[in-house]
Image: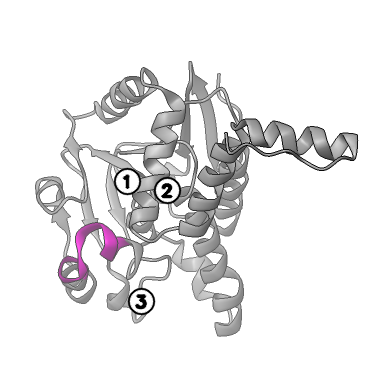
Amino acid sequence: MSTPQGLVTIRFENSVAIVQLDRPEKLNALTPEMINQLEDIAKSLDQRTDLKAVILTASGDRAFCVGADIKVWAALEPIDMWRSWTRNGHRVFDLWARLRLPVIAAINGHAFGGGLELLATADIRVTDPHATFALPEAGIATCPGWSGTQRLVNLIGSTQVKYLAMTGRRISAEQALKVGLVQEISDIGDVLSSAMRIAEEISAKAPISIQLIKQLIDAGEGHNLAAVLEGIAGALAATTEDAKEGLTSFSERRTAQYKGK
């Protein structure tokens, strides 16, 4: 059963959360309300201990997301574009990229601009064969605004991003697979099932190990390094006998007797 979240819905199948952009009549173009909903959902998912994976997908069979709703951001004053639209999008996309749980993007259709930037926050990407991918911003006299020139570069390299952003050309699912933008191409109309199969494979593994693997790989690329190192160090220290002695001595108001164990 789906829980309504405005223009973004979330439902659960066993230990997998399925988050879905739900504005197919507008090709799932992102509005400020949708950005806010994505933020709320990411924060709530990060607190769940019963989940093992997240699938990020969209409604319809035409588009995963064609980016930001032009009518919305075109009406903004330049200072509001920076202050609210761009900065909010970055904050929310960063939340998705740092989500503790593994995220699989099930790309059901075209992914342009902000839609391509959103799917770049996922750990694994599966696409329908008819989907295409593009960064068309320069064609309307703007630039990628939600880390298309940063996170996407880390994913597929600066040359590929320059090619996409400078030409505005679309690349096919096959080309996306070749450059490493996606990891699998599903059968037609089967992308969500393909993503679910991956989620189930991940869910069969030790969940803490999966989450640590994600954090270690991301930290190795320089993302959230301090939080990862300090979090793992704190967790390791908490397992020691010295940690128990430290707490006990504090509560008993005596000098701790540490043994290095």
Residue drawn at (20%, 76%), measured in percent from left and top? 166
Q: Nearer the viewer, mark 3 or mark 1?
A: 3
- Which residue does the numbered mark 3 point to in the structure image? 143
Residue at the spot 51% in from the left edge and 58% down from the top edge: 226
Horizontal and vertical percent position of residue 47 = 62, 35
Q: CA distance from mark 1 to mark 2?
A: 7 Å
Could one spot residue 151 in this view of the protein? Answer: yes
Q: Identify residue type, mark 1.
A: Ala
Q: Earlier in the sequence, mark 1 or mark 2?
A: 2
Mark found first going from the N terminus, 3 or 1: 1
Residue 93, compared with residue 59, is above or below; it is below
Q: Residue 138: which quarter of the image?
A: bottom left
Horizontal side, residue 188 vs residue 75: left or right = left
Q: Tell me whether circle 1 and circle 2 mark residues in contact (CB < 8 Å).
A: yes
Residue sitting nearer the eye, 174 or 170: 174
Residue that numbered label 2 is attached to = 28
Which stretch is magenta? 152-161
The image quarter in which residue 191 lies: top left
* Real-space CA distance between mark 3 and mark 2, rounded to the nearest whole angstrom: 20 Å
Residue wearing tag 1: 63
Q: Is residue 214 above or below residue 2?
A: below
Q: Work out whether residue 209 or residue 107 is closer to the camera in this orientation and state it.
A: 209
> Looking at the rendering, in which quadrant would you find the C terminus?
top right
Disc 3 from disc 1: Cα separation: 21 Å
Chief SS of the magenta region: helix
Q: Are marks 3 and 1 in contact (CB under 8 Å)?
A: no
Residue 153 falls inside the magenta stretch = yes
For this view, does 78 lie left or right of residue 208? Answer: right
- Kind of residue at badge 3: Cys
Report the residue that reaches farthest toward the right.
253
